[in-house]
Image (tube, rainbow, N blue to C red):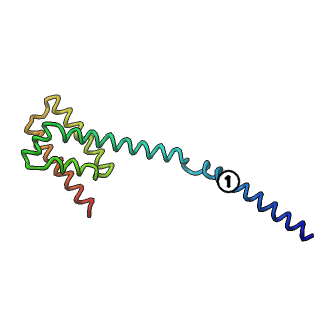
Amino acid sequence: MFQFQLQMRNAMVWMLAAMIPVVSAAAAESHVVPLTELHQAAVASTEARRANLDRVEHFFSSDVAQASLRAAKIDGDQVMKALPLLSDEELARLAARTDRLQTDFAAGALSTLHLTYIVIALAAAVFVLIIVAAR
């Protein structure tokens, strides 16, 4: 009788050991948010941040923006180094503003003087956002 109980216990242990990976895989697939969806969202967020950072860096590295920063005695390299420190939301808002500025300037809606003041204000905003975030 004891031998039979031991064999039954061993059979149950092996059966449970075989079921654990199957149950784990099923639980992972029936998760509230599938892992593939989370991965895709993370990739999309990273790509959006990279695109926004590229657009803002392109704006601040333009000749007009660099001349404006030099006129205000602001180090353009410091601005460029501070840009990656902005949050995703701040970076997206700044990218939208710089896109609008470039469009308005290209359309003649802004003079070089207006653009200079706006570039100085945006650079100051970058520094303020970094200082506030550091606290």
- Horizontal placement of 42 versus 59: left or right? right
> Residue at 21% across / 39% down in the picture?
59
- The single residue placed furthest to the bottom in the displayed view is 2
- The single residue placed furthest to the top in the displayed view is 107
Residue 37 place in picture, x, y as percent: 51, 44
Q: Secondary structure at mark 1?
A: helix
> Residue at 28% across / 40% down in the picture?
54
Image quadrant holding the N terminus, namely bottom right
Image quadrant holding the C terminus, namely bottom left
Residue 95 place in picture, x, y as percent: 26, 42
Residue 45, image quadrant: top left
Which amino acid lies under the numbered mark 1 shown in the image of this protein?
Answer: Pro
> Residue at 20% across / 34% down in the picture?
102
> Residue at 60% across / 51% down in the picture?
28
Residue 52 place in picture, x, y as percent: 30, 41
Residue 75 place in picture, x, y as percent: 13, 49
- Horizontal placement of 97 versus 12: left or right? left
- Horizontal placement of 3 versus 113: left or right? right
| Of residues 5 and 85, the one drawn nearer to the viewer in this rendering | 5
Determine which residue is flagged by label 1: 21
- The single residue placed furthest to the right in the displayed view is 1
